[in-house]
Image (cartoon, helix red, strand yellow):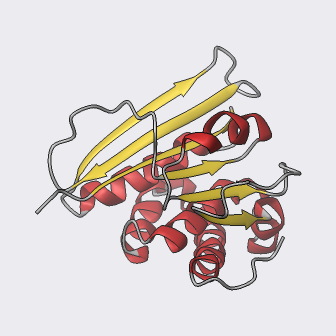
Amino acid sequence: MSAHLTEVIMAGFGGQGMLLAGKVLAHAAMGLQREVSWLPSYGPEMRGGTANVTVCISDEPIGSPFVDRPLGLLVMSRPSLEKFGPRVRPGGVIVINTSMIDVGSDRDHDCVVVAVPARKLAEVAGSERAANLVMLGAYVGASDVLPVDAVEASLVREFEGRKARFVPANLTAFRSGVELGRSARQGSEVVR
């Protein structure tokens, strides 16, 4: 029996929240007693530069946090799609932020591609800054990488204390993404 291993890259510009989304996913996996690696990479600019994070989740120890051919990809910017899109393994999940990316993926023949109007859904949820959590929800819904309630619990823990006022909008944003991801996985029409 082989180990279950999931590798996902979350990429965009600095300040778009991909590192936070990866952290929420990694902590959710740790809460389920999974082996996890979280490897951030970002340019010298904190906002506006490139930023990505690789999260590996496994039932067994992870040999290396470096991933060339991920099974999942969340992209917030067109340069990220162009760089990482071709690397996703067949059968993977690609989540594209259509609020900022005006092209689709040519991978819909061998991957689940989820087109997400992340900014719009975040605004409807009550926080335009929650676009990253809409994207995370879409990935979780399309991939079934972890149970939704485990990721929600991790999200709530991330916003404890002074940031607790952000929890309701962030949960709503995450859940809207989950529904979109599930629809894409089931082959339903995806809202663009």
Instruction: Identify the residue shown where x is 37% and y is 50%.
Output: 26
Looking at this rendering, what residue extends furthest in the right direction?
A: 102
x, y percentage for residue 56?
35, 45
In the image, taking residue 186 as reference, residue 78 lies left or right, namely right
Instruction: Identify the residue shown where x is 72% and y is 37%.
Output: 82
Looking at this rendering, what residue extends furthest in the left direction?
A: 1
Q: Nearer the viewer, residue 136 or 167?
A: 136
x, y percentage for residue 24?
45, 54
x, y percentage for residue 54?
45, 39
In the image, taking residue 80 as reference, residue 68 lies left or right, namely left
Q: Quadrant of the N terminus?
A: bottom left
Looking at this rendering, what residue extends furthest in the top direction?
A: 44
x, y percentage for residue 124?
81, 74
In the image, taking residue 77 as reference, residue 52 lies left or right, namely left
Q: Nearer the viewer, residue 87 or 40?
A: 87
Image quarter for residue 167? bottom right
Q: Is residue 110 above or below residue 100?
A: below
Q: Nearer the viewer, residue 170 or 108?
A: 108
Instruction: Identify the residue shown where x is 83% and y is 49%.
Output: 101
Q: Quadrant of the C terminus?
A: bottom right
Instruction: Identify the residue shown where x is 56% and y is 54%.
Output: 163
In the image, taking residue 18 as reference, residue 33 lies left or right, namely left
Q: For the image shown, how many numbered marks are present on the structure?
A: 0
